[in-house]
Amino acid sequence: APQMWLTLLCSCGGGAALLYVLYRWLVPALVQHHAGLALLWHDVIVERMLDVLTRSTRPQRLLGAVRRTATRGDPRSVVRAIDDFCRHTEWAMNVGDEKGTGCILDSVVSEVSPATVLELGTYCGYSTVRIATLLPPGAKLITLEFNPDFALIARQVIAWAGLEEKVHLVEGSSGDLIPLMKEKFGVKSFDLVFLDHWKDRYLPDTKLLEECGLLQKGSVLLADNVICPGSPDYLEYIRNSPKYRSQHFKSHLEYTKVEDGLEKSVFLG
Ligand SMILES: C[S@@+](CC[C@H](N)C(=O)[O-])C[C@H]1O[C@@H](n2cnc3c(N)ncnc32)[C@H](O)[C@@H]1O
Ligand SMILES: [Mg+2]
Protein backbone atom coordinates (compact mmCIF):
# COMPACT_ATOMS: atom_id res chain seq x y z
CA ALA A 1 0.00 0.00 0.00
CA PRO A 2 2.72 2.61 0.80
CA GLN A 3 4.25 1.87 -2.61
CA MET A 4 0.91 2.48 -4.31
CA TRP A 5 0.50 5.84 -2.54
CA LEU A 6 4.05 6.82 -3.51
CA THR A 7 3.40 6.00 -7.18
CA LEU A 8 0.12 7.93 -7.10
CA LEU A 9 1.80 10.92 -5.44
CA CYS A 10 4.65 10.90 -7.98
CA SER A 11 2.29 10.72 -10.93
CA CYS A 12 0.14 13.54 -9.47
CA GLY A 13 3.28 15.62 -8.90
CA GLY A 14 4.48 14.86 -12.43
CA GLY A 15 1.10 15.80 -13.88
CA ALA A 16 1.02 19.07 -11.93
CA ALA A 17 4.58 19.93 -13.05
CA LEU A 18 3.64 19.22 -16.67
CA LEU A 19 0.53 21.41 -16.41
CA TYR A 20 2.62 24.20 -14.90
CA VAL A 21 5.20 24.03 -17.70
CA LEU A 22 2.39 24.09 -20.27
CA TYR A 23 0.70 27.08 -18.62
CA ARG A 24 3.82 29.07 -17.83
CA TRP A 25 6.02 28.55 -20.90
CA LEU A 26 4.83 26.19 -23.60
CA VAL A 27 1.40 27.61 -24.51
CA PRO A 28 2.51 31.28 -24.19
CA ALA A 29 5.46 30.53 -26.50
CA LEU A 30 3.20 28.76 -29.01
CA VAL A 31 0.55 31.50 -29.15
CA GLN A 32 2.77 34.59 -28.98
CA HIS A 33 2.83 35.20 -32.76
CA HIS A 34 -0.85 34.50 -33.40
CA ALA A 35 -3.36 37.30 -32.72
CA GLY A 36 -6.50 35.22 -32.17
CA LEU A 37 -4.81 32.48 -30.16
CA ALA A 38 -2.79 34.93 -28.03
CA LEU A 39 -5.92 36.88 -27.09
CA LEU A 40 -7.94 33.70 -26.49
CA TRP A 41 -5.23 32.29 -24.22
CA HIS A 42 -4.30 35.41 -22.24
CA ASP A 43 -7.53 37.37 -22.27
CA VAL A 44 -10.04 34.55 -21.88
CA ILE A 45 -8.63 31.21 -20.70
CA VAL A 46 -5.89 32.32 -18.27
CA GLU A 47 -7.85 35.28 -16.90
CA ARG A 48 -10.94 33.16 -16.14
CA MET A 49 -8.85 30.35 -14.68
CA LEU A 50 -6.90 32.69 -12.37
CA ASP A 51 -10.07 34.54 -11.38
CA VAL A 52 -11.58 31.25 -10.18
CA LEU A 53 -8.40 29.91 -8.56
CA THR A 54 -7.48 33.14 -6.75
CA ARG A 55 -11.01 34.47 -6.19
CA SER A 56 -9.85 37.85 -7.40
CA THR A 57 -9.90 39.79 -10.66
CA ARG A 58 -6.99 40.57 -12.97
CA PRO A 59 -7.14 44.31 -12.16
CA GLN A 60 -7.06 43.47 -8.42
CA ARG A 61 -4.01 41.24 -8.94
CA LEU A 62 -2.35 43.99 -10.98
CA LEU A 63 -3.02 46.51 -8.19
CA GLY A 64 -1.53 44.02 -5.71
CA ALA A 65 1.67 43.92 -7.79
CA VAL A 66 1.83 47.73 -7.79
CA ARG A 67 1.44 47.86 -4.01
CA ARG A 68 4.06 45.18 -3.48
CA THR A 69 6.73 46.40 -5.88
CA ALA A 70 6.24 50.09 -6.79
CA THR A 71 7.31 53.06 -4.70
CA ARG A 72 4.46 55.34 -3.64
CA GLY A 73 4.69 58.67 -5.43
CA ASP A 74 7.08 57.36 -8.10
CA PRO A 75 5.07 56.98 -11.34
CA ARG A 76 7.93 55.36 -13.25
CA SER A 77 8.14 52.60 -10.66
CA VAL A 78 4.38 52.06 -11.06
CA VAL A 79 4.77 51.64 -14.83
CA ARG A 80 7.73 49.29 -14.27
CA ALA A 81 5.80 47.23 -11.72
CA ILE A 82 2.88 46.76 -14.13
CA ASP A 83 5.15 45.87 -17.06
CA ASP A 84 7.04 43.32 -14.89
CA PHE A 85 3.75 41.83 -13.73
CA CYS A 86 2.42 41.58 -17.30
CA ARG A 87 5.61 40.15 -18.76
CA HIS A 88 6.38 37.62 -16.05
CA THR A 89 3.12 36.85 -14.24
CA GLU A 90 -0.03 37.70 -16.14
CA TRP A 91 -0.77 39.45 -19.44
CA ALA A 92 -3.09 42.49 -19.34
CA MET A 93 -4.46 44.85 -21.99
CA ASN A 94 -2.28 47.90 -21.16
CA VAL A 95 -0.61 49.68 -24.05
CA GLY A 96 2.58 48.17 -22.62
CA ASP A 97 6.28 48.99 -22.62
CA GLU A 98 7.10 48.38 -26.31
CA LYS A 99 4.44 50.78 -27.64
CA GLY A 100 4.87 53.03 -24.61
CA THR A 101 8.57 53.70 -24.86
CA GLY A 102 10.75 54.23 -27.89
CA CYS A 103 9.25 56.21 -30.67
CA ILE A 104 5.56 55.97 -29.91
CA LEU A 105 3.34 56.95 -26.95
CA ASP A 106 5.95 58.69 -24.78
CA SER A 107 7.49 60.45 -27.79
CA VAL A 108 4.14 61.68 -29.07
CA VAL A 109 3.19 63.04 -25.64
CA SER A 110 6.58 64.77 -25.27
CA GLU A 111 6.48 66.15 -28.81
CA VAL A 112 2.90 67.51 -28.55
CA SER A 113 3.43 68.72 -24.96
CA PRO A 114 -0.37 68.98 -24.60
CA ALA A 115 -2.22 71.23 -22.19
CA THR A 116 -5.36 69.09 -22.48
CA VAL A 117 -5.47 65.35 -23.12
CA LEU A 118 -8.41 62.98 -23.52
CA GLU A 119 -7.85 59.27 -22.98
CA LEU A 120 -10.58 56.91 -24.13
CA GLY A 121 -10.34 53.68 -22.10
CA THR A 122 -8.55 53.81 -18.73
CA TYR A 123 -8.61 50.14 -17.68
CA CYS A 124 -6.16 49.99 -14.71
CA GLY A 125 -4.58 53.37 -15.39
CA TYR A 126 -1.29 52.17 -16.90
CA SER A 127 -1.33 54.50 -19.94
CA THR A 128 -2.90 57.22 -17.79
CA VAL A 129 0.16 57.14 -15.53
CA ARG A 130 2.51 56.98 -18.53
CA ILE A 131 0.91 60.01 -20.18
CA ALA A 132 0.38 62.09 -17.01
CA THR A 133 4.05 61.65 -16.04
CA LEU A 134 5.13 63.43 -19.22
CA LEU A 135 2.66 66.32 -19.16
CA PRO A 136 3.91 69.89 -18.80
CA PRO A 137 3.01 71.76 -15.58
CA GLY A 138 -0.64 72.79 -15.41
CA ALA A 139 -1.74 70.30 -18.06
CA LYS A 140 -4.81 68.16 -17.50
CA LEU A 141 -5.66 64.62 -18.57
CA ILE A 142 -9.28 63.47 -18.67
CA THR A 143 -9.62 59.70 -18.90
CA LEU A 144 -12.91 57.89 -19.53
CA GLU A 145 -13.79 54.39 -18.31
CA PHE A 146 -17.24 52.80 -18.33
CA ASN A 147 -16.45 49.77 -16.19
CA PRO A 148 -16.78 50.82 -12.51
CA ASP A 149 -14.61 47.90 -11.28
CA PHE A 150 -11.75 48.98 -13.55
CA ALA A 151 -12.24 52.63 -12.60
CA LEU A 152 -11.96 51.73 -8.90
CA ILE A 153 -8.60 50.03 -9.50
CA ALA A 154 -7.35 52.79 -11.82
CA ARG A 155 -8.03 55.45 -9.16
CA GLN A 156 -5.82 53.53 -6.73
CA VAL A 157 -3.05 53.01 -9.29
CA ILE A 158 -3.12 56.73 -10.20
CA ALA A 159 -3.08 57.66 -6.49
CA TRP A 160 -0.16 55.28 -5.84
CA ALA A 161 1.73 57.07 -8.62
CA GLY A 162 0.90 60.43 -6.97
CA LEU A 163 -0.80 61.79 -10.08
CA GLU A 164 -4.34 62.58 -8.82
CA GLU A 165 -3.78 66.31 -9.38
CA LYS A 166 -3.13 65.87 -13.09
CA VAL A 167 -5.75 63.24 -13.84
CA HIS A 168 -9.53 63.46 -13.92
CA LEU A 169 -11.00 59.97 -14.25
CA VAL A 170 -14.61 60.10 -15.36
CA GLU A 171 -16.82 57.02 -15.17
CA GLY A 172 -19.15 56.56 -18.09
CA SER A 173 -19.25 55.77 -21.76
CA SER A 174 -17.37 57.88 -24.29
CA GLY A 175 -20.47 58.34 -26.45
CA ASP A 176 -22.32 59.96 -23.52
CA LEU A 177 -19.40 61.93 -22.09
CA ILE A 178 -17.73 63.47 -25.17
CA PRO A 179 -20.73 65.78 -25.85
CA LEU A 180 -20.50 67.02 -22.23
CA MET A 181 -16.80 67.95 -22.37
CA LYS A 182 -17.31 71.66 -23.12
CA GLU A 183 -20.23 72.39 -20.81
CA LYS A 184 -19.58 70.07 -17.90
CA PHE A 185 -15.79 69.77 -17.90
CA GLY A 186 -14.83 73.21 -19.20
CA VAL A 187 -12.72 71.88 -22.08
CA LYS A 188 -12.31 74.12 -25.14
CA SER A 189 -10.52 71.50 -27.24
CA PHE A 190 -8.05 68.64 -26.82
CA ASP A 191 -4.43 68.88 -27.93
CA LEU A 192 -4.05 65.11 -27.74
CA VAL A 193 -6.56 62.24 -27.77
CA PHE A 194 -5.41 58.71 -26.97
CA LEU A 195 -7.91 56.20 -28.36
CA ASP A 196 -7.63 52.86 -26.60
CA HIS A 197 -11.19 51.79 -25.77
CA TRP A 198 -13.27 49.22 -27.68
CA LYS A 199 -12.18 49.31 -31.28
CA ASP A 200 -15.64 49.74 -32.82
CA ARG A 201 -15.91 53.09 -30.99
CA TYR A 202 -12.78 54.68 -32.54
CA LEU A 203 -14.59 55.94 -35.64
CA PRO A 204 -17.90 57.12 -34.10
CA ASP A 205 -16.05 58.86 -31.24
CA THR A 206 -13.67 60.61 -33.64
CA LYS A 207 -16.64 61.92 -35.59
CA LEU A 208 -18.28 62.94 -32.29
CA LEU A 209 -15.13 64.85 -31.27
CA GLU A 210 -15.25 66.67 -34.62
CA GLU A 211 -18.99 67.45 -34.32
CA CYS A 212 -18.56 68.75 -30.78
CA GLY A 213 -15.74 71.08 -31.90
CA LEU A 214 -13.25 69.41 -29.55
CA LEU A 215 -10.46 69.19 -32.14
CA GLN A 216 -8.53 72.23 -33.28
CA LYS A 217 -5.91 72.64 -36.01
CA GLY A 218 -2.89 70.63 -34.83
CA SER A 219 -4.78 68.35 -32.40
CA VAL A 220 -3.25 64.88 -32.46
CA LEU A 221 -5.18 61.61 -32.34
CA LEU A 222 -3.12 58.60 -31.30
CA ALA A 223 -4.94 55.29 -31.72
CA ASP A 224 -3.65 52.05 -30.20
CA ASN A 225 -4.27 48.51 -31.50
CA VAL A 226 -5.24 49.59 -35.00
CA ILE A 227 -3.92 46.25 -36.33
CA CYS A 228 -4.65 43.90 -33.40
CA PRO A 229 -7.49 43.60 -32.47
CA GLY A 230 -7.77 46.19 -35.28
CA SER A 231 -10.04 49.06 -36.27
CA PRO A 232 -10.23 48.93 -40.09
CA ASP A 233 -13.11 51.41 -40.47
CA TYR A 234 -11.20 53.99 -38.41
CA LEU A 235 -8.00 53.49 -40.45
CA GLU A 236 -9.93 53.79 -43.69
CA TYR A 237 -11.50 57.06 -42.55
CA ILE A 238 -8.49 58.72 -40.94
CA ARG A 239 -6.08 57.84 -43.78
CA ASN A 240 -8.39 59.07 -46.54
CA SER A 241 -9.94 62.13 -44.93
CA PRO A 242 -8.48 65.46 -46.11
CA LYS A 243 -9.01 66.66 -42.52
CA TYR A 244 -6.09 64.54 -41.22
CA ARG A 245 -2.46 63.79 -41.93
CA SER A 246 -1.86 60.26 -40.73
CA GLN A 247 1.21 58.20 -39.93
CA HIS A 248 1.54 54.56 -38.87
CA PHE A 249 3.93 53.21 -36.22
CA LYS A 250 4.54 49.48 -36.44
CA SER A 251 4.79 47.58 -33.22
CA HIS A 252 3.46 44.48 -31.45
CA LEU A 253 0.42 43.69 -29.36
CA GLU A 254 1.31 44.43 -25.74
CA TYR A 255 3.65 41.84 -24.17
CA THR A 256 3.56 39.55 -27.26
CA LYS A 257 5.11 39.24 -30.71
CA VAL A 258 1.79 39.64 -32.56
CA GLU A 259 1.89 42.44 -35.17
CA ASP A 260 0.15 45.61 -34.08
CA GLY A 261 0.59 49.35 -34.51
CA LEU A 262 -0.48 52.83 -33.51
CA GLU A 263 -1.87 55.45 -35.87
CA LYS A 264 -0.96 59.07 -35.24
CA SER A 265 -3.23 61.53 -37.03
CA VAL A 266 -2.89 65.30 -36.99
CA PHE A 267 -6.17 67.23 -37.39
CA LEU A 268 -5.65 69.84 -40.12
CA GLY A 269 -8.80 71.82 -39.37
C1 LIG B 1 -7.52 48.32 -23.80
S1 LIG B 1 -8.27 48.87 -22.35
C2 LIG B 1 -7.45 50.40 -22.01
C3 LIG B 1 -6.00 50.23 -21.65
C4 LIG B 1 -5.35 51.49 -21.15
N1 LIG B 1 -5.51 52.59 -22.08
C5 LIG B 1 -3.87 51.23 -20.95
O1 LIG B 1 -3.14 51.19 -21.96
O2 LIG B 1 -3.43 51.07 -19.81
C6 LIG B 1 -9.85 49.43 -22.92
C7 LIG B 1 -10.74 49.99 -21.82
O3 LIG B 1 -11.73 50.80 -22.41
C8 LIG B 1 -12.93 50.65 -21.68
N2 LIG B 1 -13.99 51.04 -22.63
C9 LIG B 1 -14.33 50.40 -23.76
N3 LIG B 1 -15.26 51.09 -24.44
C10 LIG B 1 -15.50 52.22 -23.73
C11 LIG B 1 -16.35 53.34 -23.93
N4 LIG B 1 -17.11 53.45 -25.02
N5 LIG B 1 -16.36 54.32 -22.99
C12 LIG B 1 -15.58 54.22 -21.89
N6 LIG B 1 -14.73 53.18 -21.66
C13 LIG B 1 -14.69 52.20 -22.56
C14 LIG B 1 -12.95 49.18 -21.29
O4 LIG B 1 -13.78 48.95 -20.17
C15 LIG B 1 -11.46 48.93 -21.00
O5 LIG B 1 -11.17 49.12 -19.66
MG1 LIG C 1 -4.48 49.21 -26.30
Image (cartoon, rainbow, N blue to C red):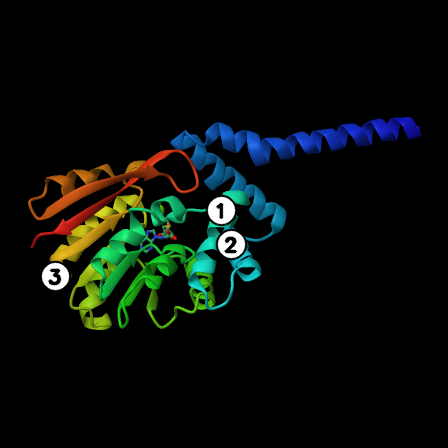
Query: As displayed, is residue 60 above or below residue 248?
Result: below
- Residue 85 in the figure: left or right of residue 135: right
Question: Looking at the image, which residue is at 62% across and 32% down?
Answer: 21
Q: Would you name the residue on which mark 3 appears? A: 213
Separation (CA) of disc 2 from disc 1: 8 Å
Q: Is residue 234 visible?
A: no
Residue 208: quadrant of the picture: bottom left
| Quadrant where the image shows the N terminus | top right
For badge 2, the amino acid type reads Leu
Q: Earlier in the sequence, mark 2 or mark 1?
A: 2
Asked whether the beta carbons under mark 2 and mark 1 sit within 8 Å of each other, the answer is yes
The secondary structure type at the circle numbered 3 is loop
In front: 28, or 199?
A: 28
Q: Which residue is mark 2?
A: 62
Q: Which corner quadrant of the image does residue 184 belong to? A: bottom left
Quick one: quadrant of the C terminus? bottom left
Q: Secondary structure at mark 2?
A: helix
The spot of residue 90 in percent (x, y) is 52, 45
Q: Is residue 16 visible?
A: yes
Expressed as whole percent of the image width and height from the top left, the position of residue 51 reads 56, 48
